[in-house]
Image: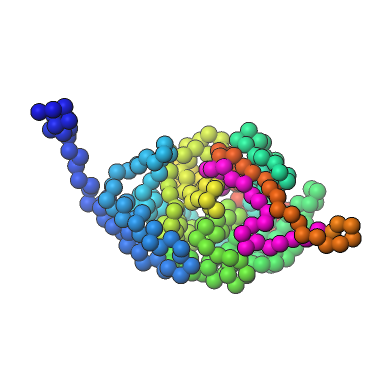
Amino acid sequence: MNDLERLREDWAHPAPPAPDAQAAARAALLARARRPRSRRRWAIRALAVAASAVIVTTGVSVFQGERTLPAAHAQVVLTRIAAAVQEKEFTPPRGDQWIYTESRVADQGKRVGQGERLTPQTPPPETVEPFWIRADGRRVGYLVRGKLTTSDPGERTPENTYALLASLPTDPDALLAAYDELYQAAGHSVDDEWIFLRLAVTLSQNLVPPEHEAAIFRAMAKLPGVTVDERATDTEGRPALSISQVAEGWRKVEILLDPVTYAYRARRETAITDHEERYPKPDGILMSTLKDGELVPVPPHLEWSVEKGTTWSVFTRVAIGVVDQAGERP
């Protein structure tokens, strides 16, 4: 008997997956198979990934040194979160009340200059942004040079109109369809990455009824590429639960929650690979500039680049509550 044969003989065989793990994995596969395939470029690949999750039922797999979690795990965790948040106590605001949020924002997109290369050491500009949304969607409030200003929000979305959000269906498939319809009607190019980001912004900027918050997490479980990390840390180094998806192939968009209460904390976007933003983009709009009194085409150029590991943006929610007037704080 050689060493390899002895190792095989002595090594304990792993126990088969528990029935609930098998059921969860199968549920994930079926849920993805049933997801409507209009506007889905990922259908065949998503089914293959989900099928792999059924076969590989270990909790964590490793690929190129980075921990990833199978689709079945993400669905189980998101379902657990949904069940918990649905039981929260909640008092809906009146239509004439205002929802106040305060966010601490660090955003490289607000400062990056032409030709600039961003690295993990590049400090993003930081601001604190208080914001008021009237619950019926008629007005929004914000500070301009320290002075309160209110205006019509223009496009009404689940992000800025509580009444609209509260009117949406709580079935996850129907909720995804409603988001598709709302944003397509507004002229946006909608895909799964866009929907994930809009769901994240809704959690960040609006007061979300428990049944709709639960529906958002269940809807996220149906989107391709969504993963969960229960051992993440937030921007302050605290333990956090991360729900994420890769956007545009170069940055990871994360929703960070309290790992115990599942309360929303922040949205963080991080470059997972080197990326260059160039003009013109494929199929993008061509621009012209005035030179010597004539319009001439803008020549191709590098707009900016970002190095892997750079934090692109962090939106940390500091406060949320209901007040009677814009300008008030809870």
Q: In x, y percent, where is residue 150?
A: 75, 60
* Residue at 40% in and 63% down: 43
Residue segment shown in magenta: 264-289
Q: In x, y percent, where is residue 314?
A: 60, 44
Q: Is residue 102 left or right of residue 176?
A: right
* Residue at 47% in and 48% down: 243
| Figure quadrant of the N terminus | top left
Q: Is residue 197 left or right of residue 97?
A: left
User: Magenta span has 330?
Assistant: no
| Residue nearest the observer in this picture, 149 or 226 | 226
Q: In x, y percent, where is residue 330?
A: 65, 49
| Residue nearest the observer in this picture, 113 or 88 | 113
User: Magenta span has 285?
Assistant: yes
Residue 251 in sight: yes
Q: Classify 306 as above or below 155.
A: above
Residue that sits furthest to the right in the current view: 293
* Residue at 55% in and 56% down: 197
* Residue at 49% in and 37% down: 233
Q: In x, y percent, where is residue 171?
A: 43, 67
| Residue nearest the observer in this picture, 75 or 308 | 308
Q: Classify 313 as above or below 190.
A: above
